[in-house]
Image (cartoon, grey):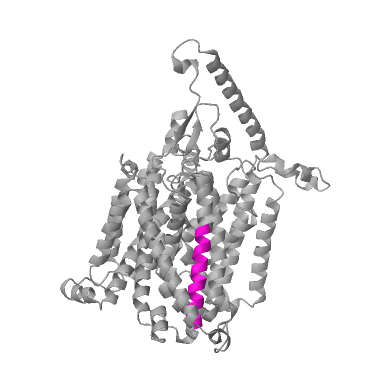
Amino acid sequence: MASLRTSFWSNILRRKTLSADTMRSDLRRCLGLGDLTFLAIGSMIGSGLYVLTGTIAHSVAGPSVIVSYIIAAVASGLSAVCYAEFGARIPVTGSAYQFTYLSVGELWAFIIGWNVLIEHIVSASAVAKAWSSYLDSAIGYPVKNYLEVHCPMAGGGVIAGYPDFIAMGVLLLSVIVIIAGAQLSSKITAGFAGVNLLVICVIVGCGLYLGNLKNWTEVEGGFFPYGFSGTVSGAATLIFSYVGYEVIASTTEEAINPNRDVPLSLFVGLSVVAVAYVGASSSLTLMVPYYNISSASPYPEAFKLYGWEWTRYVVTVGALAAMISTLLASLYVVPRYLMAMSRDGLLMQFFSIVTETTQIPYVSVLVGGATCILFAVTFELQILVEFISIGQLLACTFVAICVVKLRYEPNSISRYLELHPIHSPEEPLSTERSTLNAGFMTTEINDTPERTGSGSSPPEATASYIASTESLATAEDDFNVREYVVGTIKTDIIDSKFGHMVLWTTKYSPGTVPNWLVIFATFSLAIVSAFLCFSHHYISSWWCILFICVFGLLAIISMAMLLAFNQDDSIKTFKVPGVPFLPFISAFINILLMMRLQPMTWVRLGVWIIVGLVVYFSYGYFHSAERRVVRNAD
């Protein structure tokens, strides 16, 4: 019985090993820096700019909504740099799912992948319904009025009152675009994102022309009418306006040069989006006093006060273009996740079938698209929207923790990439035989006697083979030494006068003590977040302050103790700066935001996870590729 329990836990917590099979590319590498950047912009700037800005300015932050957008951009940037490190380091599709599988374990990876799937399915469905509603409202709701009479549905809060055929149509067209290939879909996304940016430029230019600084300085309450706490509350809501890095991290297998382009496109995209949000919110709050801003249609109503009726049509075009680019970005992620999980045996194998012409996982695209259509036709918009945020926050939390965890323990990622380096297209070819796969070169040793089929080989081939073998052997020896150092206490600390206090850490294998410190720091941050969210009535009580201070101090001490251990210095691509502090700050923000969500959102998440666990234990547990590898080795 004990051995069965051990086998069960080892199976569900087994981490994925990076190998040549893992790093293979079934998708076409065709996306350059421009494609990825516009994909990032298109996935971030959605309809929220045209609606949510007015709501936050009117009821939450006032003119300081500008500061809220800046705070939200900084907080989102912390998550983006964590995604950037993994996306550049492991250029395979799957994003947060892959990162969790490689660093935490199989079951946690499945849960993350399962939740990111529902998040993007729901996001695509919600955006399609919002697009339908926006278009219908622009022409006086004829479609809604007709369908409510002739095709009524149950309604009642969860189920929609009528089937949304416009949403179905736009989803069908989007599926056709996605299945036509990554290059075409990225160009179309870039086109709509470009239109959206042009509209934003018009809004900002006209708004600043019509604006008056008195609406910032002489209005009731001034620039911070709801206090700085209102500004922070606004940032907590607006942080979801920047969620788009999951899309870019999912494109790494189709990027021509992910080592450079993934981090760069994330930073450029985030910067452009932040400038757009700040500019648009500035123009709005300069045109109209914050208490007169319309929550439903802030920009058309603001321009209407100045007699600029024509801007209503410009804003409508911008909003519709923004929603299309966001919809395409969400649909882009779903089949890549299905494919990644299918490759690993955690979902059915047919999800990883790729077309020979466009090199797209077409079965995953069709299944994901059909699910989106079902959700859009069946459920109310508000029910869908509440499901979106928690999946992304959970994934961002795990990615941030994975960054710290892998920096302080020996891992298969560093071992594989040290012995099988991936070069960018700008680097010169080596003298060894290599294969070029759309800009990526992997060294192959083909000149061995066994492969030539003869007992001997030409002198040049033998010399090349011996040199290559010696080079790999030297690299492996060097890495074995470095791998032993990673996750152990630094030598200068052991040699110091305080060395006797940390000698106990040498009894454990490399990475064990840092791993426990990461777990303890995360637990402490979760406790602090819980007290900040759920004890607001007692926040000034001595016992509440004591608990927050104690667990906050324990988290800081745990993070500081990590500095005494050797980090993995073999990473040649982009690295998150300020480890372990920046990733933990990102994790803390994400945990805090998750705990601020409505209880029913957590209930829905629990139900979805239970459904996922049924899928995992009925299929994925038995068909796991990693489990098969271990079983064959035994």
Identify the residue at horizontal 61%, vertical 40% (top origin).
410
Figure quadrant of residue 150: bottom left
Q: How many marks?
A: 0
Q: Work out whether 291 lies above or below 389.
A: below
The correct choice, above or below, for 598 with respect to 460 in the image is below
The residue furthest top is 455
- The overriding secondary structure of the stretch rendered in magenta is helix
x, y (%) of residue 529?
Answer: 57, 66
The image position of residue 206, as x and y in percent, is 45, 78
Q: What range of the chain is rendered magenta? A: 268-286
Q: Say which residue appears at 69% left-offset and 44% top-offset.
A: 566
**Where does residue 78 sit, x and y in percent of width and height?**
57, 59
On the question of residue 634 being in view, the answer is no
Residue 63 at what x, y percent from top left?
53, 80
Which residue corresponds to the image point at 57% horizontal and 82% vertical from the top-left?
223
* Residue 237 falls left or right of residue 574: left
Residue 176 seen from this side: yes
Q: Is residue 278 magenta?
A: yes
Q: Is residue 517 above or below residue 540?
A: above
Nearest the viewer among 87 and 217 is 217
Of 522 and 426, nearer the camera is 426
Asked whether 620 falls inside the magenta stretch, the response is no
Name which residue lies at 51% across and 72% down: 279
Above or below — where is 3 with respect to 261? above
Find the residue positioned furthest to the right.
497
